[in-house]
Amino acid sequence: MHPRYVLKRTGQMILTFFVTVTFTFVLYQSMPGGPAEAMRAMILAESGQVGGSVDLNLLNQMVEHYANVNPDKPLHVQYYDYLHSLIVQGDMGTSIYQGEPVLDLILQSVPWTMFIGVYALALGYTVSLFLGAAMAYKERSLFDSVSSIGVIFLNSVPYYIFAIVLVYVLGIEYSLFPIDGRYGTFVDPGFTLEFMGSVVWHATLPVVSMGILATGGALTMRGNAIRVLGDDYVRVAELRGLRRSRVAMQYVGRNSVLPLYTQFMIGIAGVLSSTVVVEEIFAYNGMGKLLYDAVLLHDYPVLMGTLLVFTTITLLAIYIADLTYGYIDPRISTGDSND
């Protein structure tokens, strides 16, 4: 890979990150009432001083403590102060309602969200690969038609509808799975089979709900496999008398999966965004629920911090896909003048 290509992609990722941070920061500050005014009102309400005399200097200091910006300074100075605290000190501010550093809250939530997100992606794309390949081999059959309709239906209905249906049917009606929490109330956290089993049991319905999002890859896999099945080298392999399983795995499957790699990496963003609603439905305390609660409570420091983390993960996924696709599929050239 040409170093210039790596530098270009790295520069684009960093530029996109700063543009996103800048746009989000300015947008929040420009909202009616603004974060500073909202925080002032909340601090006053919590201290029981609404309608009374207040030390404005002390109030501004409290707002600066929570949001890392001084509301009396110009917007560009506030932006510089926020970036300085974020990049140099790793300080994202303090949650207004929970009173804890935003970074600590995010670090406590990220592993749980990544846990259900990774397994949802793995489940969705595994089903997509096998189902898409089977549909291609059974092209124009009843199985192909029914499966295509089923996949289109799954991707046409919002995923949170399936989440609600799963909660009602499997959680409430049949009591097969828990409908809230990350693990059992009476289970002590630790590296024990009881704890790990409880974590998997509680994560099953959220994983299935989000995994449905990734099943749309079955149609892409079907199209890729049908195209590969028509290539000459596959026919030559069959004429050479190679085993059908070897042709399917080594010739058809491998070349059909490659175009899905980029879709898989970009799908990380879709799965992460889906956690905002799914975690709220299942009362699963992860990054998505943290963001959802921050929106409802107008907890701007938490809201800004969680959005930054979601943006960073999404950009990193696309960046890795850009740099590694050439290695996975040697037919694709990276780093040349046409990149």
Image (spheres, rainbow, N blue to C red):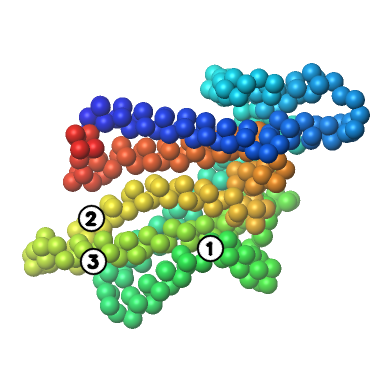
Numbered mark located on residue 96 in the image: none
Q: Which residue is nearer to you in this view: 180 or 245? A: 180
Residue at the disc numbered 2:
255
Please, which residue is most extreme toward the right here?
52
| Point 63% across, 33% down: residue | 29
Please name the residue that numbered disc 1 is placed on. 158
Q: Residue 62 at what x, y percent from top left?
A: 76, 24
Q: Earlier in the sequence, mark 2 or mark 1?
A: 1
Mark earlier in primary sequence (2, 3) = 3
Q: CA distance from mark 1 to mark 3?
A: 28 Å
- Where is mark 3, residue-wise? 226
How many marks the image carries: the answer is: 3
Residue 90 x %, y %? 57, 24
Residue 145 position within the rendered picture, expressed as x and y whole percent measured from the top left = 35, 77
* Labels 2 and 1 touching (C-beta < 8 A): no
Nearer the N terminus, badge 1 or badge 3? 1
Residue 243 visible somewhere in the drawing? no
- In the rendered structure, which amino acid carries the disc numbered 1? Pro
Occupied quadrant, residue 95: top right
Judge whether 108 appears above or below 87 on screen: below
Callout 1: SS: loop
Name the amino acid, label 3.
Answer: Ile
The Cα atoms of the two marked residues, 2 and 1, are separated by 31 Å
> Looking at the picture, which amino acid does disc 2 mark?
Asn
